[in-house]
Amino acid sequence: MSEEKKACDLCGLTVEVSGFTLKLKTGEQKYFCCDGCKGIYQMLNEDQVLAE
């Protein structure tokens, strides 16, 4: 992750901790502020998320 702060791809809060990411089948990387947001996004978009 770059030095520039990213916004959570679910709720919009600033991503303070790295590691909460998902890679989509399109190759796009999604960033999240917490494991809760990551899990909700993954559940709602399971057809687009690459299997880990």
Image: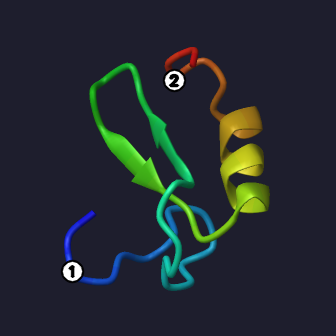
Task: Please tell me which residue is depicted at 77% across the width and 48% down the height of the picture.
Answer: 40
Q: Is residue 47 left or right of residue 19?
A: right
Which residue bears the numbered disc 1? 3
Q: Residues within 10 Å of mark 2 (few under 14, many from 20)?
A: few
Instruction: Locate residue 30 relative to residue 28 in the image: left or right.
Output: right
Residue 28 image point, x, y percent: 30, 37
The quarter in which the N terminus is drawn is: bottom left
Q: Is residue 12 above or below residue 27?
A: below
Depth order, front residue of 21/49: 21
Q: Position of residue 32 (x, y in %)?
A: 55, 62
Residue in view at x 56 percent, y 84 percent: 13
Residue bearing the label numbered 2: 48
Q: Position of residue 44 (x, y in %)?
A: 72, 38
Q: Residue at x 30, y 24 (%)?
A: 26
Front residue of 26/39: it is 39
Measure the alpha-carbon separation of dots 1 and 2. 27 Å
Element carrying mark 1: loop
Instruction: Give whichever of 10, 2 is nearer the camera.
Output: 2
Q: Nearer the viewer, residue 24 or 21?
A: 21
- Where residue 35 sits: x, y (%)? 73, 57
Display colour scheme: rainbow
Does residue 43 lie above or below 51 as drawn?
Answer: below
Q: At label 2, which amino acid type do we have?
A: Gln
Quadrant holding the C terminus: top right
Q: Tell me the kind of residue under disc 1.
A: Glu
Camera-side mark, 1 or 2: 1
